[in-house]
Image (spheres, rainbow, N blue to C red):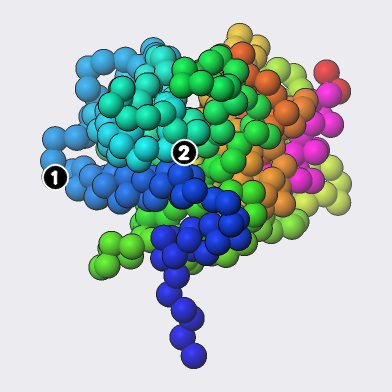
Amino acid sequence: MTEPIVTVEHFIAEQEREYPKATGAFTDILLGISLAAKVISAAVNRAGLIDILGVSGTENVHGEAVQKLDDYANGVLVSILGRCGSLSGMISEEEEGFIHIPESRDPGPYIIAFDPLDGSSNIDVNISVGTIFSIYRKRSAGPKVQKSDLLQPGSAQLAAGYVIYGSSTMLVFTTGTGVHGFTLDPGIGEFLLSYRNMKIPSPGKNLYSINEAYYERWTPGQQRLVERFRSPPDGGPSFSARYVGSMVADFHRTLLRGGIFMYPGTRQKPEGKLRLLYEVAPMALICEEAGGRASDGRRRVLDIEPDDVHQRVPTFIGSPHLVEMAERVLAED
């Protein structure tokens, strides 16, 4: 007997029926993300054939060179989500400030933060890239967005997810009731349920993922941690290193196989590189919902109260026992 075909639209509708008071506003956002992912996926697959490869000649708010495909993906998300009618506004890695919804539309009860195209510098060499998103409820009353609406801890997320554009395009998300994965069938243009209730394997593969080129810049604790992976104590399990350089790709592998993904700070930049609101917190929620653990090396990522929409945090995410080990070693400093 063949498995029933479940589209992401059908799946979201099934989940919505569990909440009799649901208005459909939240569903509209998820379906908007699904549509935007299809549009971006088509562009990624044609990147070598149309003029969206390479840098655009501008820098984003972080001083990083903006890839043409970054601009394109950001524009797609802002355009589609701005018309869904469920948002008060948006936060994007590519925009310095808060993105307001057009005045012609009534503000909705939600706010979304996203990284339009994580790992986009890899697109020229055909390495997997992705989109990361996080949805929060607007806390304040009235139509205007307040600072408290923007700077919420990850534990307040209503949903989080990512899209990975690789050998296939996958949408993975959680609304707090498990992690579910959908694979885009290019023949029919639909995301079909391919992974229900995803769990990080425990103990899983002994894999660690980190950019070891920064070894000399790390703190002594971080150096000790990687040395333990490289040369485990007598009787300890051996580890393999795997690093793509695209957070979505590295985390997706960690979710499916286990292990730990790390992007620590350095002695000069202890805050690290990854942004809390639209990179680390969404992945942390997914990781915890899948039975994993996410830390900044000292504390649970989802407990961190952000003080800036582009705040950076060190990141240790993956199988619980490995993240706990990382915290113990780092605490020895």
Mark 1 crowd level (few <14, some 14–19, many ≥20, 10 Å Cα)? few
**In the rendered image, which quarter contains the C terminus?**
top right
Q: Nearer the viewer, mark 1 or mark 2?
A: 2
The residue located at (36%, 45%) in the rendering is 32
Decide whether the magenta segment is chiefly helix, strand or loop: helix
Q: Are marks 1 and 2 in contact (CB under 8 Å)?
A: no
Check residue 320 for magenta coloring.
Answer: yes
- x, y (%) of residue 276? 58, 26
Residue 208 visible at all: no
Q: Which residue position holds label 2?
A: 132
The residue located at (32%, 49%) in the rendering is 35
Mark 2 crowd level (few <14, some 14–19, many ≥20, 10 Å Cα)? many
Q: State whether residue 3 is above or below residue 59.
A: below
Decide if residue 312 is on the left or right side of residue 219.
left
Return the residue nearer the eye: 28 or 213. 28
- As drawn, the label of residue 49 is 1
Decide if residue 227 is on the left or right side of residue 30.
right
